């Protein structure tokens, strides 16, 4: 259920008016519904009739509060860097809650992961495997690992978020996977416990999942036949979310049933690593109209958020619904280009968008920004890092303070010789 609704033409997130949030907090800012995230977690968990462990893929939104609320629900965390391990621990995770994927893990990061005694490292190359073994030997310990397979399956999603084709940098090439398991089984300081796969993100049809999962199913049987202990299968994340009313996505139940139908009789633990699914539709980016500029061809609504705050539309050509916070100016026959102030033509949130009327000073809300929103932001054009807010019914708390430009500048130095 969406937590974002109009009540008498005023936009609400849960029980809190967005206008009230903007009265108290400088725009632009992100705000997230706590209940939505909890409900998504619960809905996914209960879609499975079998035991399936959820490891939230924190790259989607790594704010400590988001991590904490999911940890409280019993979620594990999927990380991709030493920094994400540090964040997860700061949010209250322990090593056993964490699995670590990622195509380039430095020795420093691996050492940190191993010392943290994380549950599993998903290994992506032979050299990584050897490095893990060597680090463990020095530390006189053993590390649980799985190998990430590249199944060469096209996820039929945006090219920049496709990860399971042979040409992609991710995972171990299918033809080498059995020999890699053989090599791993000879290494004294690694302990093979599973297998992992992740074919891409914002996948809107179950077919690519089915194809990949069947390949993995056969592989597990073969590997077990060869004597390897495969206790879990980590199926990655990637199930898409609804960005517009026209989107038609598989339900959690359909996704879970597919997984069950393939792995249900294997006597294996199933892990999933959803990111977007749990958080995307929890959030709004709230921004204020600075100016409206009409040219012979266009009406540009220029807002105080920009591509540095939210880059998905220009990076992935993604669609995000945009709503006036006060829906009191009636319909408009104009097609708006909603753009930010940054000096790049790619700085836009929507093009040729039909939206109810807004004027200079109006607040507008960009929807479905809870995943891959704030985490992808930058300080381009010397813009501040904007605040993040969590909403629980009619109360809220700032969960990341705005970082002002003066604080960003304070970390810079003019070289002595200048
Ligand atoms: N597991 C692994 C190994 C991943 O690489 C990813 C995402 C996930 C899980 C979570 O995928 P999700 O359930 O969120 O689809 N910035 C892009 C998405 C990048 C996804 C990267 N990997 C976007 O805004 O669409």
Image (cartoon, grey):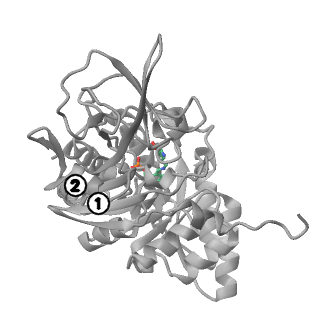
Q: Quadrant of residue 204?
A: top left
Q: Residues within 10 Å of mark 2 (few under 14, many from 20)?
A: few
Label 1: state its secondary structure. helix
Quadrant in the rendering for residue 189: bottom right
Residue 263 in sight from this viewpoint: no
User: Residue 51, relative to residue 113: is it above or below?
Assistant: above
Across and down, in percent, residue 342 comes to 56, 39
Spatial distance from mark 1 to mark 2, Cα to Cα? 6 Å
Mark 1 in CB contact with mark 2 (< 8 angstroms): yes
Vertical comparison of 143 with 129: above or below: below
Q: Position of residue 234 (x, y in %)?
A: 41, 58
* Residue toward you, 29 or 377: 29
Judged from this view, the residue extending furthest toward the bottom is 140
Instruction: Find disc 2 in the rendering and name its residue.
Output: 20
Q: In the image, which disc is placed on residue 24?
A: 1
| Residue that protrudes farthest toward the right in the picture | 417
Q: In the rendered image of this protein, does residue 253 appear above or below residue 337? A: below
Q: Respond yes or no on whether mark 2 lies under 8 Å from ligand 1.
A: no
Locate residue 178, reporting x and y percent.
58, 54
- SS assignment at label 2: helix
Question: Furthest-top residue in view?
Answer: 296
Left or right? Give the position of 97 relative to 14: right
Q: Between 356 and 109, which is closer to the camera in this rendering?
A: 356
Residue under the image location 25 percent in, 57 percent down: 37
Which corner quadrant holds the C terminus? bottom right
């Amino acid at each position: 259920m969406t937590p974002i609704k109009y009540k008498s033409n005023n936009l609400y997130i849960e029980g809190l008016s967005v206008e009230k949030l903007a009265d108290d907090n400088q725009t632009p800012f992100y705000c997230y519904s706590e209940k939505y995230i909890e409900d998504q977690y619960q809905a996914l968990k209960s879609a499975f009739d079998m035991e399936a462990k959820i490891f939230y893929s924190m790259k989607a939104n790594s704010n400590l509060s988001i991590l904490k609320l999911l940890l409280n629900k019993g979620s594990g965390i999927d990380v991709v860097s030493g920094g994400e391990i540090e964040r997860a621990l700061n949010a209250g995770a322990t090593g056993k809650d964490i699995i670590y994927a990622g195509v380039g893990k430095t020795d420093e990061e691996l050492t940190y992961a191993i010392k943290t005694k994380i549950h599993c490292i998903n290994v992506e190359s032979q050299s990584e495997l050897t490095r893990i073994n060597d680090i463990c030997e020095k530390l006189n310990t053993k590390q649980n690992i799985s190998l990430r397979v590249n199944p060469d399956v096209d996820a039929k999603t945006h090219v920049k978020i496709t990860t399971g084709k042979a040409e992609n940098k991710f995972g171990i090439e299918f033809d080498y996977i059995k020999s890699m398991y053989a090599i791993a089984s000879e290494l004294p300081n690694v302990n093979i416990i599973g297998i992992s796969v992740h074919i891409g993100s914002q996948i809107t049809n179950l077919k690519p999942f089915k194809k990949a999962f069947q390949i993995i199913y056969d592989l597990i049987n073969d590997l077990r036949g060869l004597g390897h202990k495969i206790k879990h299968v980590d199926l990655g994340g990637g199930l898409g979310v609804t960005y517009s009313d026209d989107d038609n996505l598989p339900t959690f139940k359909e996704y879970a049933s597919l997984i069950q139908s393939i792995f249900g009789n294997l006597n294996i633990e199933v892990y999933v690593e959803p990111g977007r699914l749990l958080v995307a539709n929890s959030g709004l980016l709230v921004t204020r109209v600075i100016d409206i500029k009409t040219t012979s061809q266009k009406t540009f609504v220029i807002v105080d958020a920009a591509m540095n705050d939210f880059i998905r539309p220009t990076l992935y050509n993604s669609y995000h619904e945009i709503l006036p916070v006060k829906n009191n100016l009636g319909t408009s026959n104009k097609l708006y280009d909603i753009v930010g102030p940054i000096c790049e033509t790619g700085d836009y949130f929507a093009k040729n968008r039909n939206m109810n009327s807004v004027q200079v000073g109006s607040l507008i809300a960009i929807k479905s920004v809870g995943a891959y929103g704030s985490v992808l932001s930058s300080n381009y054009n010397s813009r501040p890092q904007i605040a993040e807010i969590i909403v629980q019914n009619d109360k809220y708390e700032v969960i990341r303070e705005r970082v002002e430009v003066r604080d960003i500048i304070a970390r810079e130095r003019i070289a002595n010789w200048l």
